[in-house]
């Protein structure tokens, strides 16, 4: 593969082969209820869809070195402290990594992953991480004081994935590092932001990481590239074809394809994670808990539709395993709790815990809506997005009667993934964090 004058890699044999199997990054796919145009038969669901999991064997190992003295600081560096010492010896079957890059470090998943890296437990999957050099990317203006207190040896760099200079500073001196890419756009004001951040920002980050000699990139994706399950007892796996759900799903699909295109130049692992829950939650999750308490939680249809959920500590364990395993290079994994949950079970569990363990008086009501309400919301969402606009509540309502459920068997078998925390315990810990950290359901999240 060679580079164009612009510095981007031009397609080679691998990419041309991928293009015959998968839609090009610029191609559009439509989800449930949308028209289909320009898709391969497998993307329309006809025949057997090709696996997009195994692309390449692991690249030849690169010997890592600590971040160079003063590297990556300069303008925009929030903080750098602490000295780095070599990691403990580990098995030759595991990757030796002493440098860690993390995007989205102030976000829901990113902050929990950073806490896991800085205060690992014997079950965290990376007990030696305290001796690694950690550099974390946060948006300009984000408050990192809490993270600085919990992760005193991490270096925080303020920057935007869409800015080439920021990506260069973030990746400077990171030869041999592992990159966790947890940043992403989920609920924007304008549709174009999905593509600017999720697709284009990832491409810019990966191109920079390749130039700097980063060894492996673990990329957090979503369930949305595959859309919704075609029938109630179906579970997504790594052979499921792309059927992206509106523009968020398309942007994540195009991101995944861009990652696969660069798999010859950097080890990549794609992690598809559905609905998060757990500590460090944003205000929208606290609002959901409050709606359950107040009897306003929406149940669209009969509430039996299944949703896979990812308790954050389960997911962090999986991300660390994906970073360490040589066999994970070039793979795609679904990572969630071991089993999916019906919407009724999710809401019933939250309500029961609020009353029995957190002293809340619940209304014991549900805001029931007929199944077609989600269909109407989908059409409204579709129309708004066609105009370049996005409305979070309409979008969420459009999914409320859908099953979005996956199997994690591949991650369990190949990585040793063990999602031991299930719904009740995970929600208990989520609520405990909410009451202890932000003062309960009626206080705004930080």
Image (spheres, rainbow, N blue to C red):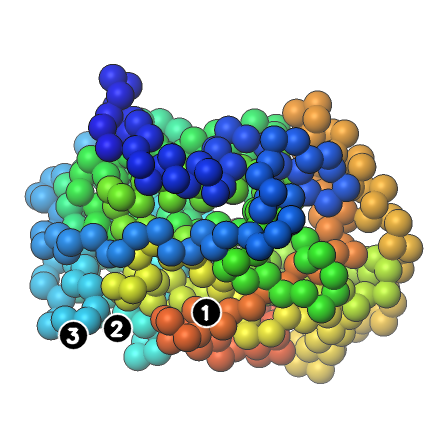
Q: Earlier in the sequence, mark 2 or mark 1?
A: 2
Q: Residue at x 61, y 52 (%)?
A: 47
- Can residue 433 be seen here? The reply is no
Q: Residue at x 82, y 48 (%)?
A: 374
Quadrant position of the N terminus in the picture: top left
State the residue lying farthest toward the bottom.
Answer: 356
Q: Nearer the viewer, residue 177 or 363?
A: 177
Relative horizontal placement of residue 401, taking residue 267 as reference (left or right): right
The residue that disc 1 covers is 410
- Circle 2 sits in a helix, a strand or a loop, which is it? loop
Graded by Cα atoms within 10 Å as few (under 14), some (14 to 19) or many (20 or more), the crowding at tag 2 reads some
The residue that disc 2 covers is 127
- Circle 3 sits in a helix, a strand or a loop, which is it? loop
- Quadrant housing residue 301: bottom right
Q: Position of residue 333 (x, y in %)?
A: 45, 61
The mark lying in front, picked from 2 and 3, is 3
Q: Earlier in the sequence, mark 2 or mark 3?
A: 3
Query: Rounded to the nearest whole Å, what is the CA distance between mark 2 and mark 1?
Result: 24 Å
Q: Is residue 358 above or below residue 69?
A: below
Q: Nearer the viewer, residue 266 or 188?
A: 266
Tell me, for residue 91, which label it has, or none.
Answer: 3
Q: Position of residue 143 (x, y in %)?
A: 41, 44
Q: Residue at x 46, y 38 (%)?
A: 20
């Amino acid at each position: 593969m060679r580079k164009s004058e612009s510095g981007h890699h031009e397609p080679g044999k691998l990419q041309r082969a991928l293009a015959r199997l998968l839609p090009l990054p610029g191609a559009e796919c439509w989800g449930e209820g949308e028209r289909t145009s320009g898709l391969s038969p497998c993307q329309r669901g006809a025949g057997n869809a090709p696996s997009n999991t195994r692309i390449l064997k692991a690249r030849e190992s690169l010997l890592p070195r600590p971040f160079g003295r003063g590297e990556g600081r300069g303008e925009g560096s929030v903080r750098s402290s602490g000295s780095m010492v070599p990691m403990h010896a580990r098995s030759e079957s595991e990757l030796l990594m002493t440098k860690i890059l993390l995007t989205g470090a102030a976000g829901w998943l990113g902050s929990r992953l950073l806490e896991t890296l800085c205060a690992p437990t014997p079950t965290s999957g990376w007990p030696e991480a305290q001796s690694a050099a950690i550099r974390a990317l946060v948006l300009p203006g984000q408050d990192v004081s809490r993270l600085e207190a919990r992760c005193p040896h991490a270096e925080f760099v303020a920057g935007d994935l869409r800015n080439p200079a920021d990506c260069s500073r973030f990746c400077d001196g990171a030869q041999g590092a592992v990159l966790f890419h947890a940043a992403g756009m989920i609920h924007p004001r304008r549709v174009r932001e999905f593509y600017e951040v999720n697709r284009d920002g990832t491409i810019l980050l990966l191109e920079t990481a390749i130039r700097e000699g980063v060894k492996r990139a673990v990329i957090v994706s979503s369930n949305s590239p595959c859309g919704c399950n075609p029938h109630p007892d179906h579970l997504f796996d790594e052979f499921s074809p792309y059927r992206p759900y509106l523009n968020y799903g398309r942007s994540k699909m195009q991101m995944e394809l861009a990652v696969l295109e660069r798999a010859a130049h950097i080890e990549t692992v794609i992690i598809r994670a559905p609905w998060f829950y757990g500590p460090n939650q944003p205000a929208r999750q606290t609002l959901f808990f409050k709606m359950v308490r107040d009897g306003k939680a929406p149940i669209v249809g009969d509430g039996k539709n299944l949703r896979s959920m990812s308790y954050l500590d389960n997911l962090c364990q999986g991300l660390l395993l994906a970073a360490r395993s040589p066999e994970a290079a070039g793979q795609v994994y679904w990572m969630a709790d071991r089993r999916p949950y019906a919407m009724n079970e999710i809401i019933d569990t939250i309500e029961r815990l609020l009353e029995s363990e957190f002293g809340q008086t619940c209304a014991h009501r549900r805001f029931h809506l007929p199944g077609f309400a989600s269909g109407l919301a989908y059409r409204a969402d579709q129309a708004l997005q066609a105009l370049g606009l996005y409305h979070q509540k309409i979008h969420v309502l459009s999914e409320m009667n859908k099953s979005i459920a996956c199997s994690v068997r591949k991650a369990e078998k190949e990585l040793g993934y063990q999602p031991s925390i299930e719904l009740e315990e995970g929600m208990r810990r989520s609520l405990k964090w909410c009451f202890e950290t932000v003062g309960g359901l009626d206080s705004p999240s930080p």
